[in-house]
Amino acid sequence: MSTAVIHDSEPTPEFYSRSMRVVSQWQSGDLPYAEAERTLKDMNREAVSANHLANQGRVEQLLGVMQSYRGSLNVSILHYERARAFFIQVNNPLRIAICDLNLGEVYRFKGDFNRARTLYEKAYEASKILDDLENQAFAIGNKGQMLLSMGQLEAARGDLLESYRLSLQFPTESDERTGLQCELHHALTLLYLLQGKTDAAWREAKQAYEIAGQIGQPLEKGFANRAVAEVVTALEAAPEEGFSPDPDVYYHAANQAFYEINAEGEMARTMFAHAKSLAQRGRRMTAARKLQRAMILFTQLGMIDDAAKAAEAQLQVL
């Protein structure tokens, strides 16, 4: 075991590439969650043995990402805080900003919007100073989704559109581009439906669906299918030729896509959206049971705001 602490500001290129390969294989559904987590923990032991602080920070950050998608929010926070501490030690402002962004996302899921907003804005300003386009886009896009959850539709729309504008400037080889764009299209679909603009909502959902069809990755497919399901529910018909008039088809496809990568938080959100769709179509008892399951899942995952919304929706259905 090495005794000298290595204070390099960045992970070693080989270590970074290896860690990204693990996460990319998990996100594509080619590597089961348990195996991906085990590999990253092995890499963490390797980094600890070498006393390489930035490598340790990188593994902690990626473990945080995976736990966040699974909905293990408190565990995710611990990983992100550890990663942030390592990057502070090696004086890496970019990776500190990324950790702030990651933490903001977790606090949004927990319903702590004040803390999430502070972290998003902090990450956005730091990324702007560092000229990091991708993290600017994620920070303002995530803030837009938070504002959407709060019902501040016009402010949300401005942030979501700005995030999308920035995403168009990502390098074509970016691993983040299509996932962010499908998530933004999904958010804009919901926003336009709340405003009664079904044509605009369908344009957003269809764009997400087309991207997902080209890319074929689970995350993109999940958001795209859920967006289409929301529009089909609102229209009570197929939006155009080639699409099913049954929203259940798309909710099931979304759930299956998120299941491939163990994205339990998004699976719970899909269940919640599906339940509301069933209630709108008069299937109230089925909707009530699904809302109950969604509420339990949200509570177990620490997604407090979503749990409260599911409880409120259940009362309305019953």
Image (cartoon, rainbow, N blue to C red):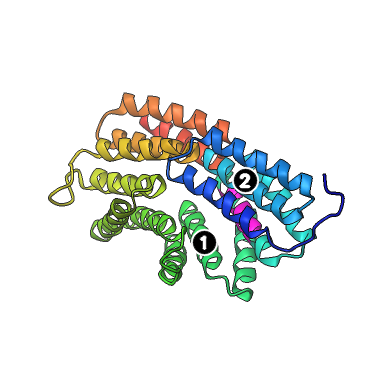
Residue that numbered label 1 is attached to: 138
How many marks overall?
A: 2
Does 257 sit above or below residue 201?
above
Residue 132 image position (x, y, % from top left): 57, 70
User: In this rendering, does residue 265 appear at all?
Assistant: yes
Residue 96 image position (x, y, % from top left): 69, 61
Amino acid at the residue labelled 2: Gly
Q: Which quadrant holds the C terminus? A: top left
Residue range corresponding to the magenta coloring: 98-108
Q: Would residue 288 appear left or right of 238 to someone viewing this image?
A: right
Q: Along the polypeptide, which appears first: circle 1 or circle 2?
A: 2
Q: Nearer the viewer, residue 46 or 278?
A: 46
> Circle 1 sits in a helix, a strand or a loop, which is it?
helix
Kindly identify the residue that appears in the image at 66 percent across and 61 percent down: 95
Q: Nearer the viewer, residue 16 or 89?
A: 16
- Which residue lies most toward the left here? 241
Residue that numbered label 2 is attached to: 64
Amino acid at the residue labelled 1: Phe
Kindly identify the residue that appears in the image at 55 percent across and 33 percent down: 34
Residue 127 image position (x, y, % from top left): 61, 69
> Circle 2 sits in a helix, a strand or a loop, which is it?
helix
User: In this rendering, does residue 318 appear at all?
Assistant: no
Does 8 sit above or below residue 279?
below
Q: Callout 1 environment at 10 Å: few (<14), some (14 to 19), or many (20+)? A: many
Kindly identify the residue that appears in the image at 37 percent across and 40 percent down: 257
Q: Which quadrant holds the N terminus? A: top right
Residue 227 belongs to magenta span:
no
Tell me the mark number nearer the camera, choosing from 1 and 2: 2
Residue 280 image position (x, y, % from top left): 28, 37
Cα distance between the residues tagged 1 and 2: 16 Å
